[in-house]
Image (cartoon, rainbow, N blue to C red):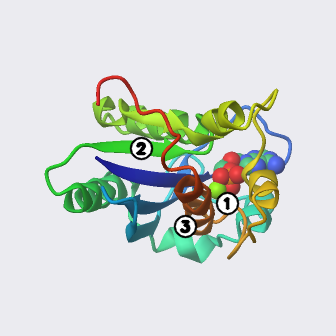
Amino acid sequence: MVYVIVDLEATCWETRENRANETIEIGAVCIGNEGKWVDEFDTFVKPVTHPVLSEFCTQLTSITQEMVDDAPLFPEALDDFQQWINNCANGDQYVLCSWGYYDRVQFKNDCLLHNLPTQWLASHISLKHQYADIKNMRRPIGMKKALQKEGLFLSGTHHRGIDDAKNIADIFLIYQDFWTMPPNN
Ligand code: AMP
Ligand code: MG
């Protein structure tokens, strides 16, 4: 079993208007069988429904218009990501791990928008919810708070997919014997 810690960034607006959010970055870290960091993946993605990023989105994520203008569309970016997962898994099974369910929902929405299969998302866990259970907390907390709780520094830039994924991986590694994997694995 390999663990793919993934974090997405998406188009967004200050007012959280009811617009269709699309992925603009896929950041991920692969942790191998032995519970060690194996590799990392990062790509920007060019959104199609609202191709112009809001100022709010660039401020939040530090992702600029040029970064997404030069990026592949979602189908190509996803293909790259899946190839990277397959390389990392090397015939083994993988489980997608993210801080909350948001990333899985966002992936699913992008797949539906581009008429792509969603079956590859079936094996997924929310580290955020499991962390709350492990720590006997009444409700889940954000990644930043969890890092503080663990005495870890938030490295890199918060709300950049690859940096968020690396920070989440730091938490993952501390509790690697405690995560509950999906029943089908
Ligand atoms: P995160 O992984 O926390 O960086 O968030 C993933 C995505 O959720 C961001 O790229 C935004 O699309 C959206 N998001 C996060 N925080 C906010 C916020 N405060 N307001 C609006 N959208 C947000
Ligand atoms: Mg993020």
First in sequence: mark 3 or mark 2? Answer: 2
Mark 3 to mark 2 CA distance (whole Å):
15 Å
The kind of residue on which mark 2 rests is Leu
Residue 185, located in which quarter of the rendered image? Answer: top left
Disc 2: residue Cβ within 8 A of ligand 1's nearest atom: no
Q: Is residue 181 above or below residue 68?
A: above
Which of the labelled discs sits on residue 96, or is there none? 2
Q: Quadrant of residue 58?
A: bottom right
Tell me which amino acid carries mark 1.
Answer: Leu
Q: Amino acid at mark 3?
A: Ile
- In terms of secondary structure, where does tag 2 sit? strand
> Residue 118, relative to residue 147: is it above or below?
above
Residue 12 visible from this viewpoint: no
Q: From the viewer's perspective, is 145 left or right of 52?
A: right
Residue at the spot of label 3: 162
Give the residue drawn at x 38%, y 64%. 72
